[in-house]
Image (cartoon, grey):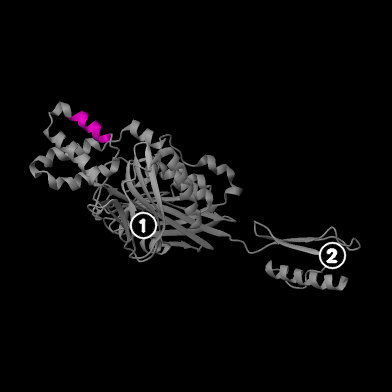
Amino acid sequence: MKNILLTFTAALLTYTAFACGLPRGKLTAPGQSPILSVQRNGVVKLEWNPLAASDLPQTVLACSLPPDEFTAHEWGTFTSVQGAEGVQLEWNPLVASDLPPFVYNVNRLPRDPAGRPAPVYYGKTAARSLQRMETPVIYFYSDRERTVDVSVRFPRGHITEWYPQLSPNSFTTPGRINQLVWDRLTILPRAQHPELQAQLPAHSAPSHYFPAREAEADFLRRTPGTDAKPELESLLFYRGVGYFNAPLTVSLPEGSNALRVKNEGAEPLRSLFVLQVNGTQAKYTYVDQLGTNATQDIVFPCRRSSRPRAEVTAQLVADMQQALVREGLFEREAAAMVKTWSDSWFAEPGVRVLYLLPRTWTDRTLPLTVSPAPTKTVRVMVGRAEVITPAIETAVLGQLQRFIAAEPDDRAQIVSETQALGLGRFLEPTVRRLARRIPAQQFSTLGWEFLQQASRPVPALVSAQRQ
């Protein structure tokens, strides 16, 4: 029996040595019953059973399998606005950015080394677009300090904001920034540099920027130029606008009591959340998958089966996070993404569909290159289809007509009532659709005045939505 144990132990040791990259012949098998296990951190451990014969010495061998040394994870959102007939609309939200002042945009370009004048690029509000690419962030996890080059291309759109500062190689296309280049980016493992958390740039005003840091990824350092101070973050951040249709179309067929979703993309769509928010009430319907060219009808409206919005939001947050984790995000990353957009996704009044975009779609839309390449790269994008329903159009049209017909002193009250509808940045595409129903002469001045005034954020309403 002892010979059998010795033979078995030797075989285990040989396998362990091979798995750990150790040369054969370096290990001698003791004669006790072995226990081989792979730990959560990737360590292979070989222990001798203390209950076995005691006439042989006890030994412990532990070594690491080749680790998943370098990982990149990314999440972000693409928002489209669609009319009741399923047409995706160009839009331009007339709202101020909520980003902290250290985030760069087209008005804060790096200085040209040769002293040439800075080129002129389109900003976010320069033109209408079909897609708002909102807050993609890229995280890195590394077992050691390393330097990488990162680039993201956006062939059918352009970049509007980013942080840290980009390489001058990003500014090569006249008029539009459709490539981000972060060269000489140093990854600093968080476990080895915990003191860097306190050195991240900060700002006191509320922003959709900061929750993304709660993923607790490794720190990133980049020096924009020879005479510039190094910039520190725990993520790469960017935003932009796109000029293409989303794969999902949403419509409200006339005379129907259903909301119709159709996948017009090249790949199946997964994890669709159809949400209606009406004041303090809400309801959502989950669709597990929608195949290519597939259509599904969902009962609408859903007032009878609505529940308190806070209750629905709590369940939706949990379900969304689980869907994101299934796609490959870490739990902290999924929680950070949902927290970033919970006030917009779950609190804003209206009808919308949230869904996961296929990885192949993301790679076509936003080609990502990291050099040296990570061991594993995860990219998870969420699509948002905001629907302008006939009820919304009717309500806004009534307010717009009242504003045009009202005396100047009475218009402030009409603006206040319009803001109470809670449309926010989606008021602009709604009014633009309605413009064709109003004589051009009347709309030319007062219509745009109404839009400008009613698009201003209302602090009390924003605060209530975030609760």
Three-letter code for the amino acid on which mark 1 is drawn: Ser
Q: Considering only vertical position in the picture, is 271 above or below 360?
A: above
Foreground mark, 1 or 2?
A: 2
- Element assignment for label 1: helix
Quadrant (top left/top right/bottom left/bottom right) for the N terminus? bottom right
Can you tell which mark lies on residue 32? 2
Q: What element carries label 2?
A: loop
Q: In which quarter of the image is residue 369?
A: bottom left
Q: Distance between the residues labelled 1 and 2?
A: 62 Å
10 Å crowding of disc 2: few (<14), some (14-19), many (20+): many
Give the residue at x 77% y 73%.
25
Which quarter of the image is occupied by the C terminus? Answer: top left
Mark 1 surroundings within 10 Å by alpha-carbon count, few (fewer than 14), some (14 through 19), many (20 or more): some
Residue 414 magenta-highlighted: yes
Q: In this view, does 3 lie to the left or right of 121?
A: right
Q: Relative to residue 451, is residue 311 drawn left or right? A: right
The reply to whether residue 217 is visible in this rendering is: no
In which quadrant of the rendered view does residue 56 lie? bottom right
Q: Is residue 339 left or right of residue 297?
A: right
- Residue at x 53% of width, y 50% of height: 331
Q: Is residue 445 visible?
A: yes
| Three-letter amino acid code of the residue under disc 2 | Gln
What is the residue that sits farthest to the front in this orientation? 304
Q: Position of residue 333 (x, y in %)?
A: 50, 50
Q: Position of residue 201 (x, y in %)?
A: 46, 41
Residue 186's disc number: none
Q: Give the range drawn in magenta.
A: 411-419
Which quadrant holds residue 146? Answer: bottom right
Near-viewer residue (150 or 458)? 458
In the picture, the disc for residue 170 is 1
Foreground: 126 or 118? Answer: 126
